[in-house]
Image: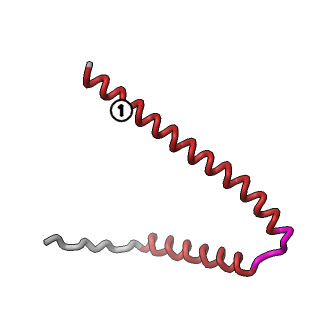
Amino acid sequence: MRQATRYSRSPNRNRHSLRIGCAILALHLGIATGCEEEVADQFRDAAATSLEAGFKQIFDGLIEGAFAAFVVGTQDEAAADG
């Protein structure tokens, strides 16, 4: 029977987790308090542009990675056959 491995958490990891928790709490409080409609519209417009650009870059990276893996795989097969 396999025994479960226990991992100890380093102080840096605990500190990092605490920072992330505080950031999430601050974000939640910011969203919960809301803001004026005009400011919210400006934020959505700015965020939408950035999000769209980010998603396009991620998608382009995935496509390029898939083609690069395919080309490398094809070259490896050709070298093995040759």
For the point 29% across and 23% down, the residue is 79
Q: Is residue 38 left or right of residue 63?
A: right
Q: Secondary structure at mark 1?
A: helix
Residue under label 1: 73
Give the vertical position of 56 relative to 35 (above or below). Answer: above
Q: Position of residue 70 (x, y in %)?
A: 41, 34
Give the vertical position of 46 relative to 81 (above or below). Answer: below
Q: Amino acid at mark 1?
A: Gly
For the point 80% across and 68% down, the residue is 40
For the point 33% across and 74% down, the residue is 8
Tell me, yes or no, whether the highlighted magenta stretch contains residue 82: no
Please identify the residue farthest to the right as the structure is shown.
Answer: 38
Please identify the residue farthest to the left as the structure is shown.
Answer: 1
Please identify the residue farthest to the top as the structure is shown.
Answer: 82
Give the vertical position of 63 relative to 42 (above or below). Answer: above
> Which stretch appears magenta?
34-39
Identify the coloring.
secondary structure
Q: In the depicted view, which residue is nearer to us: 27 or 51?
A: 51
* Mark 1, other Cα within 10 Å: few <14 / some 14–19 / many ≥20: few
Q: Position of residue 2 (x, y in %)?
A: 16, 70
Report the quarter where the C terminus lies: top left
Q: Is residue 79 left or right of residue 68?
A: left
